[in-house]
Image (cartoon, rainbow, N blue to C red):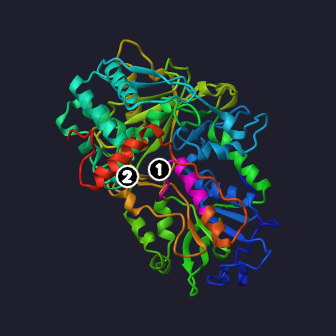
Amino acid sequence: MGRTGSTRRTFVVGAAAAGGAVALGTGTAASAAPAQGRQQAVAVLGGGVAGLTAAHELAERGFAVTVYERRALGGKARSMDVPDSAKGGRKPLPAEHGFRFIPGIYHNLPDTMRRIPFPGNAGGVRDNLIAPKEMMFARTNGREDLRIPIPGEKEPAELTLDDIRRALTGLLETGFNLPLHEIAYFVNRAVVFLTSCDARRNSTWEDTPWWTFVRAGQMSKEYQRILAVGITRNIVATKAEVASTRTVGTLGEAFVFNALGRGADGPPDRILNAPTNEAWIDPWVAHLSSLGVTFHIGWTVHEVRLGGDGLVSGAVIEDADGVLRSITADHYVSAMPVEHARRTWSAGLRAADPQLARCDQLRTDWMTGIQFYLTETPPLVQGHFNCIDSPWSLTAIAQARHWPGRDFAADYGDGVAKECLSVDISEWDKPGVLYGKTAKQCTREEVAREVWAQLKDALNDTGRTVLRDSTLHSWFLDPGVDGIGTPHPTNQDELLIHPVGTLYNRPSARTAVPNFFLSGDYVAVDIDLATMEGANASARQAVNALLDQAGSSAPRCTVTPLFRPPELESLKRHDHFRFKAGLPNVFDLG
């Protein structure tokens, strides 16, 4: 991965003590305004997308950056090797926490990718993004699957509200067997959200579950499965009964306009053209190393301490050898996932900024990947598919066919496996079809068998056999999952979810502690979802806040918000007046 050790940009890791141990509490307090002309040191706590983005922006602006990462650079976005799978000089089989998905609604992350050099690519790592041709909703019980072509990049076009209504109605009428009155009602709800002002979204719709907003309880099972459960479990990885309408609606709105060619960085669906580390993370780490960033891998943050002067005085970190160290810097960026970060905030730090305590109210859930390696290339859709009826809310993609520069069998594993079918499991608390147990109650082997059975139920039920047991070479379940099949299952890589009220507890990147900043997909940014884009945007906001605090004259990071269609702004202004007057949206039929 990256190099470790000291460079001219390395800051002091701690004071040496007798026997080589590093004594706790020996670091000097950080200064709010370092001496003029001295290179300021930043400790970035966490090496996922948020941490690497912060390191990237800070290193480009002349700061001395050290990244501390407990496990592996790239975090949940990384790919990893399947242990003991390499034979005959090939690379190990590639695995991952979950498949990468970089839609055209993202702007900040692709900008960072453009600035990561990659041999032969004028546009850097961003040129490694390719667009699948289609997607599919895979149905069970003999119902025909729905294959949907994915539009490519378009020239922006003016759209009226009627254009949007007609597009949504056409999709639902063509693709799903729903009663016409249910289609009309759902489209009306979409129009209500599209024309709602920010104040209504941030209060009324933030406090309204998606299930209630779309009146799912009064609709058909098909409506509930597709437009309530399907959208929330497979797009925002939370339950329709509790998911914030603001979150679901905001992302739905962004994807609709992306598909209609408005405000997009690229097509609605983009993936990498090789395993993630090869196409993105390893080149990124190499580039950051060339900028002088230092990496310490296998170092676990235990506590961030507040000094008597109201500044962070240091962080207690366990190094790769199990030795506790006290590290100091001028500034600290906490870039870990919220469930890990909040455990490191000392009582003093929490007392100094109430928004840190509110982070305890943020909720996470399980969404974890499993890969199946196949000895044949199955006749699957050329892109992602959603097993919309599966109990465990499976989504998947056959990856090797999208890696044009790789011969999978020749490059990876033992030369027998030809395809990697990467599957995300979004629901871990409902019974499966084989054992009648939830995913958390199953052993790892049972999870693999259960997921395979649910995939076959979705893909092999319309007169052709897409997946064959005889072609299953092996499987790999994310190692972050542990203890499943026991009374105490754990997951190191949970996903932030968005029940009603989440918005109020999301912190800002700037804290009340002058030299302490937050970065991660839980931080309040424009894209209201746990995403790599949110992690990237929050890191940019944290760096801008740090630059202000440091008195730096360096240019600030650009933070691009989600697209706001200008055609709807007048309707939103009208709704603002109605909201202030206590009136419903003009299109709201109840």
Tag 2 residue: 498
Tag 2 secondary structure: loop
Q: Residue at x 80, y 74 (%)?
A: 37
Specify start and end residues of the magenta stretch as a single range: 524-542
Residue 245: x and y, percent?
33, 47
Picture disc at residue 530 = 1
Q: Is residue 10 visible?
A: yes
> How many labels were placed on the picture?
2
> Alpha-carbon distance for marks 1 and 2?
9 Å
Of the two numbered discs 1 and 2 on the same chain, state the one appearing first in sequence: 2
Tag 1 secondary structure: loop
Picture disc at residue 297 = none
42 displayed left or right of 261 = right
Q: Nearer the viewer, residue 162 or 527?
A: 162
Q: Is residue 321 visible?
A: no
Q: Residue furthest right?
A: 8
Do labels 1 and 2 touch, CB within 8 Å?
A: yes
